[in-house]
Structures are given as structure tokens and as C-alpha cells.
Image: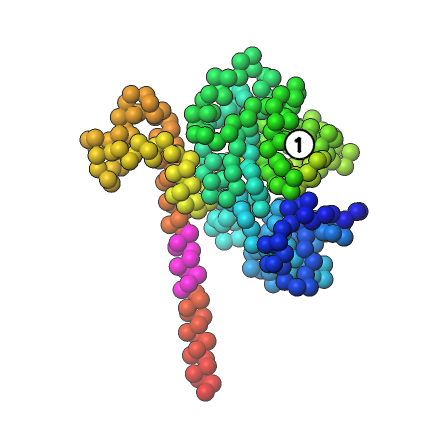
Amino acid sequence: MPGFDLWELGWNDELAENLEPGLVPGRVAAVHRGAFDVWTEAGAVRSRLPGRLMHDGLDVAAGDWVGLGDGLVRAVLARRSAIVRNAASNQHRLTHGQTLAANVDVAFVVSSIGPDLEPRRIERYLVTIWESGASPEIVLTKADRLEDPWPMVAEVEAVALGVPVHVVSALTGQGCDALRARIPAAATAVLLGSSGVGKSTLVNRWLDEEVMATKETREDDDEGRHTTTHRQLLVLPGGGLVIDTPGLRELQLWDAGSAALDATFADVEELAAECRFGDCTHMHEPGCAVLAAVETGKLPRKRLDSWRKLQRELRAIAMRHDAVLRKEELRKWKLRTRESRARTRLR
Ligand SMILES: Nc1nc2c(ncn2[C@@H]2O[C@H](COP(=O)(O)OP(=O)(O)O)[C@@H](O)[C@H]2O)c(=O)[nH]1
Ligand SMILES: [Mg+2]
Ligand SMILES: [Zn+2]
């Protein structure tokens, strides 16, 4: 296995400064059960966390930069972005944040044009991406399936609010090169979206090779292709990287700040600023600009409902999160007092 040019993988001076001397830098290309594929200057290696860090529940994701020592991951370097979802943890019957991809520059929200297109799902992805530090872009695939895809594109543009919307077909090649051009050399993109929308087909087209298994090749896959059961980092010919991900049944939000929600629903926020009362709940108040806009059809009722729903979800997550933190603080405090009591006895 030939070695990698780290700079082509997105390595930079800031990362180099953060690397402890003596550790070997590498980028996590894929995460398997307890093991990582790490790309280094010496080639691709299989690595894992030492027991102590594993116990800390360190969340290593595809795209992470790590420092290796004695073949183990000794450090995860500070991320410039992280796409984090809410994941159920059966261990504590709690939820925790799970990083889907790290150090991503552009996050493509991929949906296929057709009856399964769901603007509400796109809003959910946008909140998560606005929180991540990556820039969102929307990709509508399988444009070849409809005689006239443009009414559906317009529907998506109404929720995109200035986020670029790309219309592509991996079948005819429409828009594929233009989308590819959104990933400059050394930059990293991630493809997010439900299973079957055509993410892997698009990646294969860019690679000009059947590297990722698609729906057709998935069942009888004996060609050694990457199945999309895990998130996989890939180097594109001509520079730039892309992380292909398996479909998420549903993207559960994780602790996003109100700024991420405001960015996704800038239209509602703008209206809310016009309400007569500063603390308007937009439920029943007189002089409510939001309700007035719903009345005149300027703001779709579904969009207001979606905003409320996501707001409630985020509030619930923040409250749960706070409760967990408080419990953790209490545990540490008890531990400290017990330790100091023990010390007092010893004296
Ligand atoms: N008509 C049409 N079908 C597509 C297109 N892109 C992908 N598909 C098909 O959609 C199915 C799912 O594609 P796949 O890449 O596996 O989706 P993924 O789960 O998002 O990675 C496959 O049967 C593809 O052949 C497209 O642009 N047009
Ligand atoms: Mg796939
Ligand atoms: Zn109002």
C-alpha cells in the first residue's frame, strides 16, 4: 500500500501544531467495530483506541485527524467541523451525540426527486449542518425520473433559503461535474441522506470506478467493493475528498444551538421580529406577523409546524443534556469530598 500525501488529505499547519511530538499523524478513513482505517504517510493502517481512551467513550469519526503511537490512536486532533447526530445508547438507556463525519468543509444533503422528496427532512439536515461548522448544499438526484423536475426543485428552494440547490442525474450525467467542482483540492465533502437516494452511485461516477457498492451491486457483492454499512472517506481523482455514508432512517437532532435553527428558518425569524409583542409565541397573540403570514399563505403552515417541532426537540435535548451534566458534576463532587475526607483521615 503506497503512502498518502497528508496535504492532499487536508493536513495543514494548524493541525501540525496541535500534534504531540512523537506521534504519527493520520486521517481516519473509516470506522469499523472498535477499529479504524487510518491513512498515513506510510500507507493505510488498521488501528484502535487504547483501553483507557475507549473507556472514556472517545467519539472518533471518519474524517478525524489522529496521532498514532505504537500503532494505537493516542490523540484526536481538534476538529474544524463535526456533523453530530443524536444516537441511542443501549448501555445507559441515554442518548449521546454521535459524530457522523469530522473536518468536513461542505455537507451535501442528498434527496431524490420524486414522490419520496420530503422538505421537512431537508430542514432537519440543515439544522444539524448549520450547527456543525460545515457549509450545507442541497443535492436533488435522479432528475431523469421526471419529465419536469422544476416544480419540485422550487419546493426545495423555498426551504433552502439561499443554500445552493444542485439538480443532478447520475444516469445522464446532468449536473454531476458541476457538483464535483464544489469540492476543491484538499477539501472534504460528505454525502448525507436516506438510503437509496443515489449517494454511492454519484461517488462511483466521480471516481470513474465501482468503488462503493450501490443498490444493484449490494446483494451479490463479491468484487471487494466497499459496502455502505460504514462511513467511508475517498480521494477523488484530481483532488478533494468525499465521505460516503450509509442512509440514516431518520436524522435525530443533537444539541444544536438556536443559531442553527435561526439559520435554517431565517424566514420565520424575520417575520417574528415584526410581531407586536417581543415575547410572542406565535400561537394566538394579536399583531402576530408569523400567524398573519400563514393566513395570507406567505408562510406555509407546514413550515411553521416544522419550526415549532424542531424547536421543541432541541429544547428537550438541551434539558436532558443539562440533567446528565448536572448528575455528572454531582458524581465528581461526591468523589472529591470522599477523597478529601479520606485524606483528612490519613493525616
Ligand atoms: N434513475 C436514476 N436512478 C439512480 C440515479 N442515481 C442512483 N440511481 C439508482 O438508485 C438506487 C440507489 O442508489 P445508491 O447509489 O445505492 O443509493 P445510496 O443508498 O444513497 O448510496 C440504485 O438502484 C441506483 O441505480 C439517477 O441519477 N437516476
Ligand atoms: Mg450507498
Ligand atoms: Zn408572533
Q: Which residue ends up furthest to the left in the rendered image?
A: 286
Nearest the camera: 317 or 101? 101
Query: Outermost residue, top direction?
Result: 147
* Residue at mark 1: 203
Residue 134 colored magenta? Answer: no
Residue at x-position 54% and y-position 22%: 113
Q: Is residue 74 left or right of residue 79?
A: right
Q: Indicate the secondary structure of the residue bearing disc 1.
A: helix
| Display colour scheme | rainbow
At x 45% / y 30%, what residue is drawn? 162
- Left or right placement of residue 276 versus residue 10 in this view: left
Which residues fall within the magenta stretch? 321-330
Residue 160's spot in the image, x, y percent?
A: 45, 29
Q: Quadrant of residue 236?
A: top right
Q: Main secondary structure of the magenta part?
A: helix
- For the residue with label 1, is its CB less than 8 Å from the closest atom of ligand 1? yes
